[in-house]
Image (tube, rainbow, N blue to C red):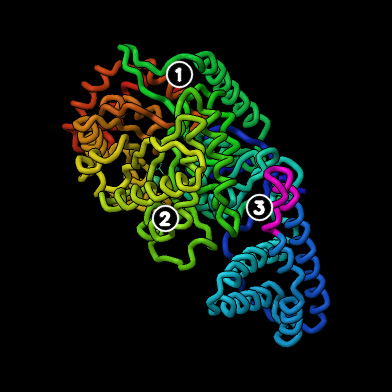
Amino acid sequence: MEADESKKSERRFTGIPVAQGIAHCPAFIQYTQDEEIVARQLREEDLPEEVARFEAALIATRIELLEIQSQIASAIGSQDASIFDAHLLVVEDRTLIDEVLRRLERDRNNVEFVFQEVSRKYCETLEAIDDPYLRERVVDIEDVARRVIRNLLGKAPQNPAAHDQPHIIVAHNLTPSDTAQLNRKLVMGFVTEVGSKTSHTAIMARSLEIPAIVGMQGICQEIQLGDDILIDGYNGLLILNPMPETLAECGRIEQAKEAVSERLQLIRETASTTGDGRHIILSANIDLPDELDDIAENGAEGIGLFRTEFLYLNRVQPPSEEEQYGHYRMAAERSLPHSVIIRTLDIGGDKTNLSLESTEEDNPFLGCRAIRFCLEHIDIFKTQLRAILRAAVVGNVRIMYPMISGIEELRQANAILEECKAELSAEGVPFSPDVEVGIMIETPSAVLVADHLAREVKFFSIGTNDLIQYTVAVDRLNDRIAHLYNPTHPAILRMIKLTVDAGKSQGVWTGVCGEMASDIVLTPLLIGLGVEELSATSTLVPRVKKAVQSLDATGCEALVAKVLEMDDASQILAASMSMARERYAELID
Ligand code: PEP
Ligand code: MG
């Protein structure tokens, strides 16, 4: 009795808050980590049960796959759903299954271990054969194997899609691909053991408005499937078995936050202009095409960053020109009368698609990522550029290349763009020849040659998420060194200033589309540095608009003149925070 009582006592765990909001639901443990499975020796009499577990896991995996397939079919069409046909064949593959059963009999190890060994051996054999079709099969087998193992380990369906009650996911890690697949009607929040504020998983949680906490080490050991948990995405708290007083307190916090959100809705149709009349273009970042509704709803001026790579994740074949054309055209139409800046494929780093990237790299963020990948895979790049050029006929479309590190890459990309125009023209396909081209400024080398780059582009958009990681040499995903990931590092302010000044001297405007643009504590600095456009997470646009309207550009410039003399990041942050508090305390506290 007493043991039961103590089990139910409230316990608190802290992590890094990355997406605001409060959720209170049963916990759902998701195994996304590649579990290193330890071999256990079984007795002969245990074998029938082990075989039964294996069969149950195969059936559960088959059900999961069929469910995902039918969800995809109803969301985006049966053709896309057919990519799961190959996955289904793996669960039914007799050779694979028989090999597992044979080894189980022979070695008498736990079936997770046996299955992992057999599926790895299969993948290695297929990888060694130089055939693109077989390489695609490796990806299918790996994905299915992961699902079967999760089902074996969890003894319950592990795919949230198969879980039909609202829940909070507790996981070691969620990749951006996992996050893109979340069932948004049922996933009320998530908590992960690793992660950082600028990982794409965190960025997506903010745009989906799902409360989220990362970096909560060891939490998977503390929480069980179905536990009563509350997460507070404002303060980075997970509360197990919350007491009635805790629930009441959290209810009060939510109400106060909702009242602020409602007030912000009132300024939706107003312009993002400072008190002294400087208009700052305030656009939205979108990751998934179905976020298009959020643009007008939040009063954004079009799309400042369309992260197209999410169209390429969770699939074996890259999207066709026709499919991409459909998405870009829709984005262009929905952004009118404003523009949409379509960023070309930024695959790599934490956004991986194993079927596109055939080799693993030791340093993926410094590797064949973004424009580098596209310049290596010209067929994939051209398909995308053609789709963008065609979509530009119906709206105001701009192209933006990610991770440009020097002028050669820009010129190569532009040469390919010109080829695409020539081909479309020869084929008689309608397209817009005058699409403006800009680049992301996210490497220190691009900042230092921004004067050169400015001669050959129409705009710069600073990707502060990467610019900070590359300038300060701090992995944006590594929670261990998160304290060094500092937007107010004097070097970052100088980088932004150098870019803005180089752009201005050639009549090129500069925006910011990294997470700094969504952080209202930093808005005084960005305005003072002369940034002309802010592209923020769409759900945070109303807050940024209120911040812009509450500031004076001349005051921000005076602040920047002062902070550029400072040598300490926390002093700079305090100075900006002090102006933000003075002007819009209700949004900050
Ligand atoms: C950035 O680096 O700031 C950016 C906007 O791009 P991403 O976060 O997609 O790398
Ligand atoms: Mg980037």
Mark drawn on residue 453: none
Q: On the image, numbered disc 3 is attached to which residue? A: 29
Q: Is residue 172 above or below residue 127?
A: above
> What is the three-letter code of the residue carrying label 1?
Glu
Query: Secondary structure beneath disc 2?
Result: helix
The structure residue drawn at horizontal position 52% and vertical position 36%, both measured from the top left corner, is 206
| Residue that badge 1 annotates | 586
Callout 1 crowding tier (Cα within 10 Å): few <14, some 14–19, many ≥20: few
Tell which tag, 3 or 2, sits nearer the viewer.
Answer: 2
Q: Nearer the viewer, residue 185 or 568?
A: 185
In primary-sequence order, the first of circles 1 and 2 is 2
Main secondary-structure element of the magenta-colored stretch:
helix
Q: Position of residue 435 (x, y in %)?
A: 40, 36
Residue at x 16% of width, y 32% of height: 565
Residue type highlighted by circle 3: Ile
Distance between mark 1 and mark 2 Cα atoms? 45 Å
Measure the C-alpha gap from mark 3 to mark 2. Answer: 37 Å
Location of residue 49 with respect to 502 vertically, above or below: below
The magenta span reads 69-84
Image-quarter location of ligand 1: top left
Q: To which residue does mark 2 refer?
A: 374
Viewer-proximal residue among 164 and 26: 164
